[in-house]
Amino acid sequence: MDFSEETTGALKPCLLRRNRSRDHHGAAASSLEELKSKACDILAIDKSLEPITLVLAEDGTIVDDEDYFLCLPDNTKFVALACNETWTYSNTDGGTAWLSQESFEAKDETDSSEGHRWQNLARQLKGDLSSIVLLAEEDLQTLIDVPCSDLARELSQNPAKTRDLQNTLQQVLDHREEARQSRQLLQLYLQALEKEGGILSKQAESEAASDEGMDEVDAEIAGPVTLSSPVLRVLKEKFSPELSLSSQDLELVIKEHPEALARALSWDPEKAEEVQRACQEQLTLRLQQVQSLNALHSISARKNSLTEEPVSLKRAK
C-alpha cells in the first residue's frame, strides 16, 4: 500500500504566522494546498497578495512539495509569505524544523555556541526519530559526540536508550561512508580499465586541470548560485557529496540551474547535472525511508490498539 495514499485525508495540526509577527495561529489541514487556503483566511492575507508561499519558521525552507509536507511532524511552525515578501529569521520560533540548520547563514549568526546546535538537533529527533535519515553527516557526528548523560537529559530518556540511539546514529554515518568508499572503488576500477585500454578521457584531464583552481572557488562564488559556502565546499571536496549533505541542502542543490552550478564550481555542465541527479536520488531515498518508518509506526500503533481492546472488553464484563 502506498503510504501517501494511506495518509491522505488525515488532518495535520500546524502553526501559522505572518512574516515578522509573533502571533501564531493553529490550523489543521490534510494537504499543502488546504493549509495555504486556511492560512490566507486565518491570517487575513489580501487576495491581491496571493499566491502565498509557506516556509518553515525555523530556517526558511520553502515547502512546495506535498510528500515533503506529509513527512513534517505535527505542530510544525510555518510562515506565510505573500507574493511580495521574503522570509526573515526570527529567534522567537524555537526548534520546530526537523532538518539541519547548519547550512543557512542567518541561523549560524544567532547560534553563539556549539551547545545550541546539538540541542536543536536533539529536539528534532525528540519530535520525530525518523528524521535521522535526513540529517547531514556533520550533524550526525555532532549528536554522537555529545555526552550520553547530556543527550539523555535533553531527550528525556534513560541513558541506556540514549546509548542505543547514539549507536544508531553511528551506524547511519558508517553506512554512508561505506557507500562512498564503494563508489570510489568502483570509479578507480573503471579508471584502471580505461588506462589499460589506452583510453584516457579528455573530460578527466579537464577536471584535473580545474582542480588546481578549486581553492579559489570560495572567493569567486557569489554569483548566480544561492548555495552557502559550506554546501559549495562539500560539493567540490567530497566524493559522492550527496551522502554528506542534509536533505534541506540536497533540495537547494537540485533547484540550482546546472550551468550556474557548473560555473560556480569550475565544472562542465554534464558533471553538474550528474551531481544533481545523485542529489535527487538521495533525497527521494531518504523521504521514502521516512515514509516507510512512519507507516510502520502507524501499523504498530493500530495493532497495539487492537490487542488492547479485547482486554478492556473482558474487564468490562
Image (cartoon, rainbow, N blue to C red):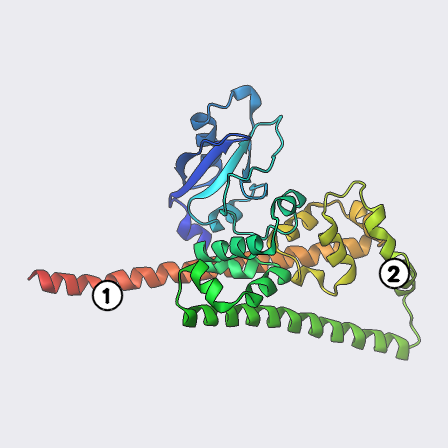
Q: Residue furthest front?
A: 112
Check if mark 2's residue and mark 1's residue have beta carbons within 8 Å.
no
- Let me know if residue 2 appears in the view: no
Could you tell me residue 80's position as x and y percent?
53, 32
Distance Cα–Cα, label 2 vs label 1: 61 Å
Q: Is residue 148 above or below residue 64?
A: below
Q: Nearer the viewer, residue 29 or 143?
A: 143
Q: Residue placed at 65% from the left, 51% from the top?
A: 249
Q: Nearer the viewer, residue 281 or 182?
A: 182
Q: Position of residue 313 (x, y in %)?
A: 13, 61
Residue 237 in view: yes
Mark count: 2
Residue 32, relative to residue 310: is it above or below?
above
Q: Secondary structure at mark 1?
A: helix
Query: Disc 1 marks which amino acid?
Result: Thr
Name the residue carrying label 1: 307
Looking at the image, residue 231 lies above or below residue 39:
below
Residue under label 2? 211
> Which residue corresponds to the image point at 49% horizontal and 36% vertical from the top-left?
33
